[in-house]
Image (spheres, grey):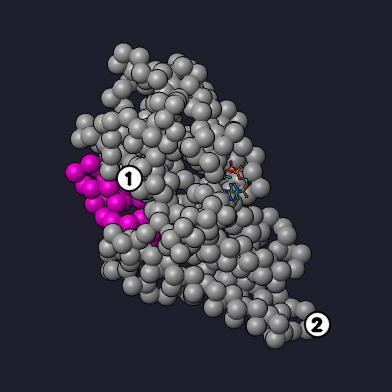
Amino acid sequence: MTIEVFASPWMREEHRLLADSAARFFRERWVPHAAAWREAGIVPRACWREAGAQGLLCVSTPEAWGGGGGDFAHEAAIMIEQSRANLSGFGGALHSAIVAPYILHYGSDEQKRRWLPRMATGELVGAIAMTEPGTGSDLQAITTHALRDGDDYVLTGAKTFITNGQHANLIVVVAKTDRGAGAKGTSLLVLETDDPDGRPVAGFRRGRKLDKVGLKAQDTSELFFDGVRVPAANLLGGREGQGFVQLMEQLPQERLIIAVQGIGAMERALAETLAYVKERKAFGRPIWDFQNTKFRLAEVQATVLAARAFVDACIVAHLNGELDAARAALAKAWVSEQQCKVMDECLQLFGGYGYMMEYPIAELYVDARVQRIYGGTNEIMKELASRFM
Ligand SMILES: Cc1cc2nc3c(=O)[nH]c(=O)nc-3n(C[C@H](O)[C@H](O)[C@H](O)COP(=O)(O)OP(=O)(O)OC[C@H]3O[C@@H](n4cnc5c(N)ncnc54)[C@H](O)[C@@H]3O)c2cc1C
């Protein structure tokens, strides 16, 4: 099976080389274990160190802070290859291109020095904890709070659906530092889950590793904070009450990432399906020979090309600092909807085998579904985009 790769305007030689080496690494080192990881419901902790040693973590973090010194295009090149390799369990994109940027953009030099180099090696695994059992879309309604007590904040509350929840030891927690001030009372606080001796900090507890429809190897989890003392020096941005603005500034990149991942997954699905229908026979001829198959896959091809062109344009805009929140929201919503349709069309052409988890198309199908939910649901994305119309 070969995945046809079209040139993207944002891909320079260095991005192509990085994509090639990431693809080789994923294919040779991780794909052979992917089924076992899905079975275990988690990737081994050692993967984080291995990815760090391979130069696949924090590629857009400046070299001065231990990162790869690249840009968002470097991150995107890796994400596409990881999606094409169908390795949805490893939360590297969230770690490198969502959590690290919060520290890079809002952290003090001391915070950057303390955390970013260790994120780049995989010693620290990042997570961001916004969603709570009682609220997801309505982020202003969170109840987790961090109240100042001397040189610390005392953090209390519960979070759920947190990507990298079992492995994470550096968690950006969204909490109210002023419970009466609505969005303006929201702050981002960085929790190191282990003390300098490697013991878990008092009051912090990981809950269940959640059993999901897809993303089976991803350790999405509940987290609990019961009076956890977080040094006041771990506040991002130097002042309380900036969390909501910081989130709004960074969420477009998170949404673009979801769209980028959708492209890699759709390209893989199309390649898998083309290979299958040319091999599998019915009524004495390959499935490919039926006009229905050709028409369906021509439509899928057009969808994938259109989605790629849309996402490419968003990446170029983002690299130029011009990606607005509305376009990022629409890219996330539209691409994830196309992804679900593409997976459904492709799975159908596998017949009964498409419904068997041993076939990558079945994994791609179940993994796609959450793309319309996380990072802000597609309904919220359309609501947001409509405000600019
Ligand atoms: C696998 C996975 C990984 C995740 N990773 C993370 C993570 O790392 N960190 C994190 O903080 N969160 C994470 N999430 C949480 C995710 O971002 C939320 O699930 C999502 O934002 C929706 O919130 P909710 O589940 O509370 O749904 P709700 O907000 O309860 O929404 C339920 C339904 O109501 C609709 N709805 C709500 N409000 C409106 C409205 N105003 N107009 C129209 N429709 C509306 C929604 O679109 C949805 O269809 C993850 C979720 C999953 C499933």
Q: Residue at x 28, y 35 (%)?
A: 237
Quarter residue 317 falls in: bottom left
> Residue 329 placed where, x, y %?
47, 58
Which comes before the other along the chain, label 1 or label 2? Answer: 1
Mark 1 lies on residue: 101
Query: What residue is shown with label 2?
Result: 283
Decide if residue 156 is in sight here. Answer: yes
| Residue 218 screen position, x and y as percent | 54, 43
**How much space separates mark 1 and mark 2, taking CA atoms?**
55 Å
Residue 209 drawn above or below residue 17: above
CB at mark 1 closer than 8 A to ligand 1? no
The residue under the point 59% across, 75% down is 300
Q: Nearer the viewer, residue 90 or 1?
A: 90
User: Residue 72 at x, y = what percent?
Assistant: 32, 57
The amino acid type, in three-letter code, at marker 1 is: Pro
Residue furthest to the top:
150
Q: Count every numbered label the image shows and give the total.
A: 2
Q: Is residue 59 magenta?
A: yes
Q: Assign the C terminus to one quadrant of the image.
A: bottom left
Image: magenta residue range: 56-81
Q: Position of residue 44 (x, y in %)?
A: 50, 39
Mark nearest the camera among 1 and 2 is 1
Which residue is drawn at the image coordinates 28% and 56% (left, top)?
A: 71
Q: Which residue is more in the foreground, 185 or 247?
A: 185
Q: Amino acid at mark 2?
A: Phe
Q: Does residue 8 sit above or below 285 in this rendering?
A: above
As helix, strand or loop, the secondary structure at mark 2 comes to: loop
Near mark 1 (Cα within 10 A), the count class, few <14, some 14-19 or many ≥20, is some
The answer to whether residue 356 is magenta is: no
CB of residue at label 2: within 8 Å of ligand 1? no
Q: Give the left or right position of residue 129, taking residue 136 as reference.
A: left
The N terminus lies in which quarter of the figure? bottom right
